[in-house]
Image (spheres, helix red, strand yellow):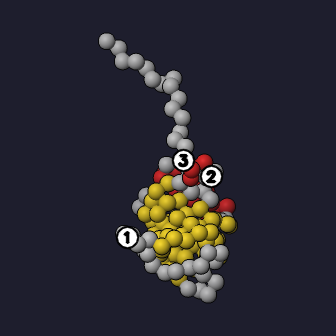
Amino acid sequence: MQEPKLLHLKIPPLKTHLSERRRFPRFHCEFPIDCITKETEIHVGIAANISQEGILICLHDRITVGTPLRVQLVFAQGFKLKAISANAIVVWSDIVHHAFWGRYRYGLRLIKMSEGVFSDFKRLLGHLA
């Protein structure tokens, strides 16, 4: 008996409240990230998910919403470590009571990234997809 071919079926993507607001998909990750404020304070954290427009990060330190940051995301590409630097702004924050890493979660909107860095960033997103 032949198995039915299901290639012609198109399954609609799941629609949730959050997925309808986002223009770009988010990908789960666990990359170290450095966040540098204007006062040259460095906050070390973890990037929990990432998209073409923003990053969800976890930090031990408190940062106010609206703070501009310079972020540096470090990841492995083959046998080399790559770093992506970008300007971002904190758009929301949340306190996490039972977190594995970091007491505070922040949503960052990426503002500016150089063209060469952006191609590395898109390549990283392609690997996460």
Kindly report the distance in space between the C-alpha atoms of the residues bearing marks 3 and 2.
Answer: 9 Å
Judging from the image, what secondary structure is the residue with disc 1 in?
loop
Q: Amino acid at mark 1?
A: His
Residue 83 appearing in the image: no
| CB within 8 Å, label 1 to label 3 | no
- Location of residue 4 by image quarter: top left
Q: Amino acid at mark 2?
A: Arg
Residue 98 numbered mark, or none: 1
Residue drawn 56% across the image and 85% down it = 41
Residue 6 numbered mark, or none: none
Question: Percent from the top left, x then y, of residue 69?
Answer: 61, 76
How dense is the environment of label 1, judged by Cα within 10 Å: few (below 14), some, or many (20 and up)?
A: few
Query: Which residue was labeled with disc 2?
Result: 21
| CB within 8 Å, label 1 to label 2 | no
The mark nearer the N terminus, 1 or 2, is 2
Name the one closer to the observer, 75 or 54.
Answer: 54
Query: Which residue was labeled with disc 3?
Result: 16
Question: Percent from the top left, x then y, of residue 36?
Answer: 57, 80
